[in-house]
Each structure stands twice: as structure tokens, then as C-alpha cells.
Image: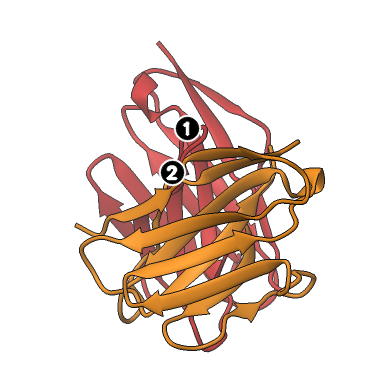
Chain colours: A orange, B red
Amino acid sequence: GAVVSQHPSWVICKSGTSVKIECRSLDFQATTMFWYRQFPKQSLMLMATSNEGSKATYEQGVEKDKFLINHASLTLSTLTVTSAHPEDSSFYICSARGRGNSPLHFGNGTRLTVT
Amino acid sequence: SQKIEQNSEALNIQEGKTATLTCNYTNYSPAYLQWYRQDPGRGPVFLLLIRENEKEKRKERLKVTFDTTLKQSLFHITASQPADSATYLCALDIGGGYQKVTFGIGTKLQVIP
């Protein structure tokens, strides 16, 4: 149980275009989902907290207009990287948590390369 | 802010030995601490959670300790196998209304056959 599906697993896009990444909890309801970014040999950096039916909460230094998050249902959150630039190239990972202090369940990540 | 220290250098260990990984943190003690495994190009996978009032937690060949006085957690893998080779992440809750979690940089474990 507790499977999180993230799609696509990798994407290559041109500078200036937008990319949407989907994160789905397949067998549980996730009131809260988290989006992380990970650069090579660095730790996961929390970008934003996504709450079903409300606006996402962004971490300091993360541009909300650049990284649009939508949490339309209890099983789906999307991250859209708008007007992507080469420096946005990274590994983006979503996670979801069930109720209470349950552990995080992660998707397999999306490798974004902006050319 | 909470800072997590993990030995970012790789840990090489002979198959069959016990691997011990360290996680130190600063500032306040979290209500719970978690360990995850991450393989290259994949998302982390949850392994164990230990609460502040627990000294030790075990799961099969895994053991985690939590010392709030030392502000340290140790993660042990006994009878290590090459398949245990991965990066192991320590994670702490950082409070906030949505139970946010912050991660250490991880320690890369290599089990040599």
C-alpha cells in the first residue's frame, strides 16, 4: 500500500516553455503533498507544501509564480515549472502523507532538463 | 533553523559486517525522526520512524537509536548485503501546521562482496 505515482519520470524541454509534473497517491488519500527539488549530491530541498483545496505554502526563496502548484483532489497534485530556464534543471520529487504522523511516501521523481 | 548533519562521505563496508550511520541535529529535538533509503535516480523509500520517547527501534536487520541528549540518531544494518548499497537519509520534522520534514544530505553506503 501507500503508493505514490509521479509522472513523467523524465522530461527535456526548451528554455522558455512550461512543464507540468503530476503526483498521484494511488491507494490512499493525501490531504497534504510536498514538493522537493534535489541537485546532484545534495539533500532534498522542500519547495512547497500542497494542500487539497487551498493554496500551496512555499518555502522561502521559492518563486510561487514560477512553480505553480495545484492540489485539485485528495489524490492529485501538480507542479508546473513555468518559463523554464537551464538553472531549473533538477530532480523534482513529490511526497504524500496520510493522516497523523505517518511517514512520507515518495514518487520516483522527475528528471527535468532544460536546454 | 534545524540543521541536520550526516557524514556525506561514502561508507564502505564488507559484506556481513554491521554498518552504522550517524545523524546529528542542532537546535530543538524533533518529536520523531525518520530514516529513508534512496537509490540513484529514485525517490526515497521510508524505512523506520522513531519517536522522541523511544530509545531504540528495530525492523528485521535494521536498528535505529535516538538520543535526545546527544541530539543524535544511529542507524545500523546488521549482516549487511551488497543489496543494501544505497544512500540513507535522516529526516526530522520541522514543525509547522503541515508536519513538514527536513532531510539530511544522506550517507552513501557501499557494501563490498
Residue A61 in the image: state x and y as whole percent: 80, 70
Q: Pick whichever, B52 or A70, lies toward us.
A: A70
Residue that badge 1 annotates: B86
Q: Helix, strand or loop at disc 1? A: strand
Residue B48 falls in which quadrant of the image? bottom left
Q: How many numbered marks have been drawn onto this rendered protein structure?
A: 2
Residue that badge 2 annotates: B37
**Labels 2 and 1 within one chain:** yes
Local packing at callout 2 (Cα closer than 10 Å; few below 14, some 14-19, many 20+) is many
Residue B71 falls in which quadrant of the image? bottom right
Residue sitting at the far top: B113
Whether residue B50 is situated above or below residue A6 in the rendered picture: below
Tell me if label 2 and label 1 are in contact, CB under 8 Å.
yes
Q: Residue at x 28, y 53 (%)?
A: B58
Q: Residue at x 38, y 20 (%)?
A: B82
Local packing at callout 1 (Cα closer than 10 Å; few below 14, some 14-19, many 20+) is some
- In the image, which disc is placed on residue A18? none
Whether residue B73 is situated above or below residue A54 in the rendered picture: above
Whether residue A100 is situated above or below residue A41 in the rendered picture: below
Residue B66 in the image: state x and y as whole percent: 46, 63
Q: Pick whichever, A99 or B36, lies toward us.
A: A99
Q: Chain of mark 2?
A: B
In which quadrant is the N terminus of chain A drawn? bottom left
On the rendered structure, is B84 left or right of A61? left
